[in-house]
Image (spheres, grey):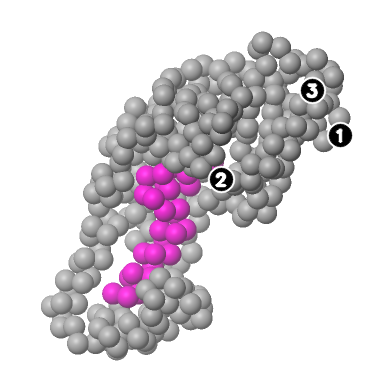
Amino acid sequence: MHVDYIARINKTFDYIESNLDRQITLEELAGVANFSKFHFNRIFKAIVGETPFQFIQRVKLEKAAMFLISRKNDSIADIAFQCGFSELSVFSRNFKKHFGISASEYRSQNSNISQMDSKEYQRALLTGRYLSPELKLQSRRKEMKLNKSVEIKDLPKMTVAYVRHIGPYKGNEQLFESLWNRLFAWAGPRQLFNGDTKSLCIYHDDPNVTSDDKHRVSVCITVPPETAVDGEIGKMDLEAARYAVARFELTSKDFEEAWDWVYGQWLPENGYQPDDKPYFEMYPEEPKDGIFIVDICIPVKPL
């Protein structure tokens, strides 16, 4: 893992720890890490294993658990507010979901911990659990055997025609088949397929941030710039840019792991970070027997 990525994520950890008593926005964290807010959430999840929201929520709850033991004179409500929860009911519900017991039960079960033990417990929570990411990173690193190659390429400007879907799509093979069929049914009679035609799938939102019902995905084919479109068929330009193009052989269940590997391992280890441009999948071949040949294309710039 590139030391610059480690340093940037460490900065977000420190910032979160210093501001746990209030709401922290994704834009704030992206600014602290000096990553594009367009890509920050995916980078964070790929490296840490949690989204920023999940991470912040967990750290708040673990700090509250520490306070339940070490601040015996503070009420549970006081501790909830100290850890950034504006409502006791929200804190109570999330605490029980995370620890499996209520905050009062947790305090009762740990009431006999000595002051020295309490300090050791605090130290455990404040060290390797989340403030030493390199240990966690090493434990999560593994070879991505499904990867066939990664190249840095300057992709030319492309004009694409598309059919767009708004709503849940993860794992819905029938939905994607329907979208592709509608696009191909439009393109075929217009003789838009040739040896240079490329098929792409553009994801417009980060699935870890945007709610499922608002996700946008566009299935596309490249077309001549002058191509006329109407109805459900749209058209847009993808500007020329430098991309990391990672080729994989995947089943439908492997796509998320492949994306995380490129973002969380290959890019930082090779001195790149995502640029503020669309990212997409490109399919050089039709899938066969449930196996997809896919190029994951992420716009990049040097660290």
Give residue 206's mark: 2
Question: Closer to the N terminus: mark 2 or mark 3?
Answer: 3
Mark 2: which amino acid?
A: Asp
Between 232 and 190, the one nearer to me in the picture: 190
- Dominant secondary structure, magenta: helix
Question: Closer to the N terminus: mark 3 or mark 1?
Answer: 3
Mark 1: which amino acid?
A: Gly
Disc 3 secondary structure class = helix
Q: CA distance from mark 3 to mark 1?
A: 13 Å
Q: Name the residue tied to disc 3.
A: 187
Task: Mark 3 vs mark 1: give the one in front.
Answer: 3
Q: CA distance from mark 2 to mark 3?
A: 29 Å
Range of magenta residues: 38-66
Disc 2 secondary structure class = loop
Using the rendered view, name the quadrant where residue 241 is placed.
top right
Q: In the image, is 141 to the left or to the right of 152?
A: left
Mark 3: which amino acid?
A: Ala
Give residue 231's mark: 1
Identify the residue at image location x=54%, y=39%.
252
